[in-house]
Amino acid sequence: MSTDSLLEFARGPLFRLSFAVLVLGLIRILFLDLWGILKAYGKTSDKRMPWQLIRSRSFEWVLPVKRMFRNRHIYSIVSFLFHIGLIAVPIFLFAHINLWKQSVGISWPALPYSWALGLALTTIVLGVAMLISRMVLKPIHLLSKGQDYFWLVLLLIPFTTGFICANLNISAGLYQFLMLVHVLAGDLIFLLIPFSKIAHCVLTPLSQVVGTIGWKFPAGADEAISRITYSDAVEPKPEKG
């Protein structure tokens, strides 16, 4: 199969499949978590909910301006700006909107080319800076897992290849190859999101509700937990053998 044929497949059927997996996977996670919230709320004896506090904390998580200056200031600001480009460029780039229109028949206004170009380049630079920081800065390195490195590299691939294809004078063969990598990486990101920690981005507005209900144990649960813990401490179970 030629590169052109693979590219058409990646832009067409594979793109639609990956997007369907993304949407259905996120809907499933949202449904299961909402069901868990309703069950937990039904079991708790204290039905009072501090809605004003929940709203303010949820807004703070969506726009974490205050939290950026509490700890690791520079890294937090870099991460925040990186995520802005990470979301804005794929959604509002004209070429991507055109792909959506061809694939599923929907479109929306695009960013001016100069804005999209600046955001894409900024996202690449900040992503590389975050990757280096995770490798060389001990406090961040200790908190980083393999998935953190994998996702940073995977997210940088479509940005880098797309930037090269759109702005550098390269041969037709190299353009086709890099564009194929660009589209396949995007499809892979869509496919993997519902099965990774990134999937919980869909629950960000509900995170404070989940946390609040999670601490509302049924009446008497704290005393029962204390008795079990005390019993295990003073009467340890005999070892087998």
Image (cartoon, rainbow, N blue to C red):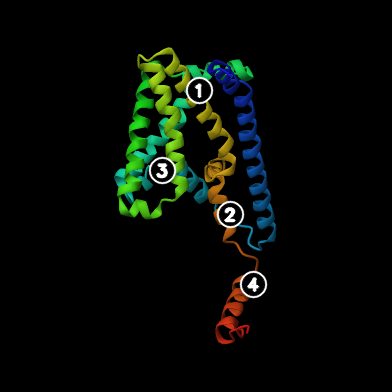
The CA span between labels 4 and 1 is 59 Å
Q: Give, as a three-letter code, the residue at label 2.
A: Met
Where is residue 4? Give x, y as percent. 54, 15
Few, some or many C-alpha atoms within 10 Å of disc 2 (few <14, some 14-19, many ≥20)?
few
The CA span between labels 4 and 3 is 36 Å
Q: Is residue 108 something that shows in the picture?
A: no
Q: Give, as a three-letter code, the residue at label 4.
A: Gly
Q: Quadrant of residue 172?
A: top left
The CA span between labels 2 and 1 is 50 Å
Q: Give, as a three-letter code, the residue at label 1.
A: Leu
Circle 1 is placed at which residue position? 180
* Secondary structure found at label 4: loop
* Secondary structure found at label 2: loop
The CA span between labels 3 and 1 is 35 Å
Question: Which numbered disc, 4 or 1, marks the residue that appears first in the sequence?
Answer: 1
Question: Which numbered disc, 4 or 2, marks the residue that appears first in the sequence?
Answer: 2
Circle 4 is placed at which residue position? 220
Circle 3 is placed at which residue position? 64
Q: Residue at x 55, y 55 (%)?
A: 211
